[in-house]
Amino acid sequence: MVLAVVVVFALLGIAAWFLIIEPHMELVMTENGGHPSTPVSTAAPAAPPSPVNVEAMDVNQLLSEARKAMTGQRYLAPAGNNAFEFYLKVLQKQPGNRVATDALRETFPFAANSAEQAINTRDFNEAQRQIDLLAQADPTNFTLTILRSKLDAQRKLLDKQQQQTLDQQKAQQLASAKAAADKLAADKLAEQQKAQLAEQQKAKPTATPSRQAAAGTPAASEATAAAGTANSAGAGQNSEAVLLAGSVPRYPREALRTHQSGWVVVSFTIEPNGRTSDVTVVSAEPRRVFDRAAMDAVNRYRFKPAMRNGVAVSTQRQQKIEFNL
């Protein structure tokens, strides 16, 4: 009896092979001109128009369309007109259909090659659609895990490449902007130095007598001052202090590097000898950035002092000094 049971199962298997599987494979081979394992052609012919009203087709019509798609090697694409979608429709209408089941199993590896090609060409949306179709046919197939991992890796690689391109463009823009800013700062500094030199040269003839008087002997200085006082007293003049020699403030190096601008209001005393003293900062914006440069510049100022009844006197003054690039 055991032998008889074995013989019966063997006969059933042979009958299934010759009646179902082999006819389908022969049909595929006849229409494709070879075995289903023939590699997917990279130059596949253009797909025919998608059939109209696929939902209304019966099982035989769907199988016929599936065979046509197999002939054209349209395993997973284009959407709506490929073998896998037609076979899956057959299984929706007739679950367990042997022809559709066998065809999906037989062609799964070759359809997976189509999905891999879509990944390699970075057509990620199409690749995802084809992977989803494969998952409907065989959701536990390990090939799906490989395809999904490869798709995720390609997406991350593309994102990384795009980010690197954006970073390079941003770095180039920043470098160009910095070069332009440095050139502008250098040009302005050169203009300030040129203006300062011109101002010093302009004030030099007026300042020379004062320096010579200051460099003379005490007796000569006192005599000169006395003569000046006597002359001024005789004239009885009243006048305000007049700037004879100014000084361009030196731009702080840190502020120049960071392209920072600002201003300082300075209070100071103009002594009878025309020099400045008691230089203090009243207000500044920003604080403690340009204070020292402004005070140093004011300390170098030279004035014709204010006169009261022909006598040189001390006076107070405030001045706003601006720092701009």
Image (cartoon, rainbow, N blue to C red):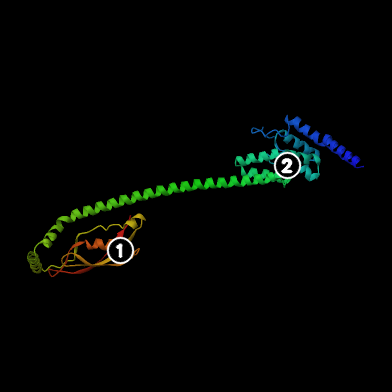
Q: Is residue 53 visible?
A: no
- State the mark number for residue 325: none
Q: Residues within 10 Å of mark 2 (few under 14, many from 20)?
A: many
**Which amino acid, by three-letter code, is at mark 2?**
Glu
Q: The N terminus is located in which quarter? A: top right
Whether residue 188 sits left or right of residue 79 in the image: it is left
Q: Which residue is mark 1?
A: 291
- Front one among 44 and 315: 44
Of pointers 2 and 1, the one earlier in the residue sequence: 2
Say above or below: 117 vs 321. above
**Which amino acid, by three-letter code, is at mark 1?**
Asp
* Residue lying farthest to the right in this orientation: 1
Q: Which residue is mark 2?
A: 85
Tell me where residue 231 appears, x and y as whole percent.
8, 66
Q: Residue at x 20, y 69 (%)?
A: 315
- Dividing the picture into quadrants, the one containing residue 243 is bottom left
